[in-house]
Amino acid sequence: MKISKLLVGSLLMYASAVVAQSSYPTIGKIVRNDPQLDELVAPDAKIEVLASGFTWSEGPVWSKQGSYLLFSDVPQNTVFKWSTKEGLSTFLKPSGFTGAGTYGDEPGSNGLIIDRQGRLVSAEHGDRRISAMPLTDAGKRTLADNFQGKRFNSPNDVVQHSSGTYYFTDPPYGMPKKQNDPTREIDWFGVYRIGKDGVVSLLTKEMTRPNGLAFSPDEKILYVAQSDPERAIIIAFPVNADGSLAQGKVLFDATSMVKQGLPGLPDGLKVDAKGNLWCTGPGGVLIITPAGKLLGRIETGEATANCNWGDDGSTLYITADMYLCRIRTKAKGAGW
């Protein structure tokens, strides 16, 4: 089943690379749990497939300056580039593992952001670090690759605070043998902060599988998704004045949705200008109010990894297994 999907998808990916399209195939549907969702997603909104044939697409980020999207294919150790004018192309390979030989089944970059200096910041599985790279004409530098001398597991996602500091998660998903990998040097799966001085601080080690993360529009809350099928939750952490985190509370529990057999787990998440969360999870992209009410979901039909705003801030780009998708919304991403 998976092989046939990839063969069909590879043709779509090739077509997208050769010529940009004016119309795209669609998948999935919008599932409404509350009429309030109509204020955020039009009833006739479509999930467009822009490209396909990927092994596991992740980490979409929009370049406002260049008007293009970058995203990871973690197993392929590649960052791809997509734009309306040029379609699909390879932007960076290798993207997350630069060593000799092979490194497990997910060696590449995962979460990506473009920071306040205009650099591509990557959470790298294989090289087990957070890196930064100018988008043109320069190589990478390491922002952090260890905590107190011990190498990270496999940094998964990253965000930047307006102060210039970075926050990231470090689960085991990118390690060759995951949580049982013999090269693990840290006993927990943490959430960390990189200060402006480069010092790495552990913010919490209580989460079993921390994954995607995002700030509320006022940056008073850090939301962190947990990709644990036994406790598939989103936690809201108050952010202290010094950048540390206060005791978090569960904003939304998707465990029952996992048990129902909906594909996916809480993973990448973004926030719109009104503070609503757009979190990939069981059944696609879950749209949740700041109070924790599920308004509905964008159902792709596949395990959905991540999402991000692009174009004018109202287009949501979605990475879902083999697909790169987008949907036009009535919302606007925070910071746009």
Image (tube, grey):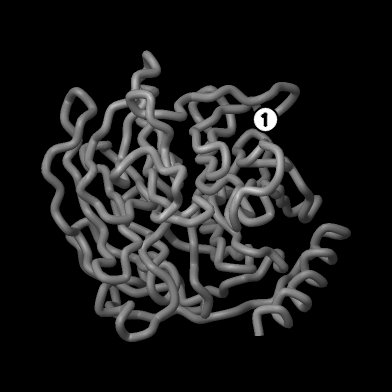
Q: Which residue lies at the image location 67% right of the left edge and 36% below the top edge? A: 98
Decide if residue 5 is on the left or right side of residue 249.
right
Task: Please provide percent x and percent y for residue 336.
Answer: 45, 41
Q: Residue furthest front?
A: 182
Up-down relation of residue 159 to residue 39 (above or below): above
Up-down relation of residue 37 to residue 195 (above or below): below
Up-down relation of residue 194 to residue 168 (above or below): above
Decide if residue 124 is on the left or right side of residue 294.
right
Decide if residue 14 is on the left or right side of residue 293.
right
Give the residue at mark 1. Answer: 135
Q: Quadrant of residue 35?
A: bottom left
Task: Please provide percent x and percent y for residue 102.
Answer: 67, 48
| Residue nearest the observer in this picture, 5 or 61 | 5
Q: Which residue lies at the image location 38% right of the left edge and 24% below the top edge? A: 149
| Residue nearest the observer in this picture, 233 or 183 | 183
Disc 1 residue crowd, few under 14, some 14–19, many 20+, Cα 10 Å: some
Quadrant that contains the N terminus: bottom right
The amino acid at mark 1 is Leu
Task: Please provide percent x and percent y for residue 38.
Answer: 37, 73
Up-down relation of residue 233 to residue 141 (above or below): below
